[in-house]
Image (spheres, grey):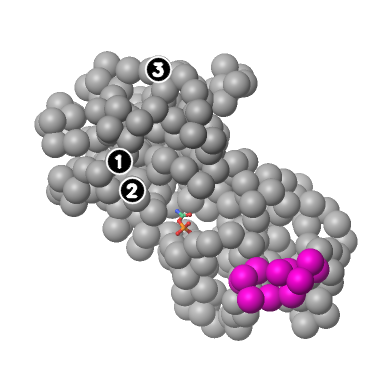
Amino acid sequence: MVNLFFEDSTRTRVSFEAAAKRLSADVINFSAKGSSVSKGESLKDTALTLQAMGADAVVIRHGASGAPHQLAGSGWIDGAVVNAGDGTHEHPTQALLDAFTMRHHLVGDGVPGAATGRDLAGRHVVIVGDVLHSRVARSNVLLLRTLGATVTLVAPPTLLPQRVDTWPCETSYDLDASLERADAVMMLRVQRERMNAAYFPSAREYSRRYGLDARRLDRLQPHAIVMHPGPMNRGLEISADAADSARSTIVEQVANGVSVRMAVLYLLLAGSDERVEEWRERRN
Ligand code: CP
């Protein structure tokens, strides 16, 4: 398996590496920094080079939305392609590990929707912050709706995508009005590296209107959990009180990421297990 990372990562890259190693795969870590990409080598030539070395799967993170799809459809490599985050588009394995974590905390035994796969039905997830630049938000909205949850995106108007009305979720500008019925609150990182200063209110104003702090933490339902995909801007979108509280699942999300990524790699790379075949048939 090749970890092909054109953008920085801690959690995703390391957890894919740990997942592959736990499945006894060989792992090559490729980071654009320090490679021939910095001399101008294209995605195509990079992919052809990796293919020549015999990659069975490529896990790619890229700053361009759609790069994994281009790689998967290009014929440049024979192996499976896994999206580890592309631009502001999607981060599917993050959504899988987030849903896994929610299911663990919010769904008890005898899951009502389990037979239909809608086992988060009746649950309400509030996703807060820089939705405009967030691939995590889009993947979560799509997956959580598939699992039956209701999702509300809360953000300042300048940090919501223009076509958000076409997404299968509600939107709000008012965090305080959205908190009380939340079963899970997912705070998003403010991606200052992707934004023009004009998009962003001052850090103090953002934190006051959209930050999760001790006061807002107290207003959550007793069972509600606090999530963040990481990396966090402590003191901006989330206070230390909230990040380190008993409600926080942030570290657990990272641990679950290894298990979920093991499952993804197993489904893509393992041999002829009956369940894998069933899954492939359903997918086709
Ligand atoms: N959540 C996430 O994608 O984190 P990294 O950027 O550290 O991989």
Left or right side of 241 for 193: right
**Secondary structure category for the residue under label 1:** loop
Q: Are marks 1 and 3 in contact (CB under 8 Å)?
A: no
Of residues 220 and 121, the one nearer the viewer is 220
Query: Whole-Å distance between the Cαs marked 3 and 2?
Result: 22 Å
Q: Residues within 10 Å of mark 2 (few under 14, many from 20)?
A: some
Q: Are marks 2 and 1 in contact (CB under 8 Å)?
A: yes
For the point 38% across and 18% down, the residue is 173
For the point 39% across and 54% down, the residue is 231
Mark nearest the camera among 3 and 2 is: 2
For the point 39% across and 27% down, the residue is 201
Q: Amino acid at mark 3?
A: Ser
Query: Whole-Å distance between the Cαs marked 1 and 3?
Result: 19 Å
Of residues 173 and 260, the one nearer the viewer is 173
Identify the residue under disc 2. Answer: 233
Mark with earlier residue (3, 2): 3
Q: Residues within 10 Å of mark 3 (few under 14, many from 20)?
A: some
* Res 172 label: 3
Decide: is 101 above or below 146: below
Q: How many marks?
A: 3
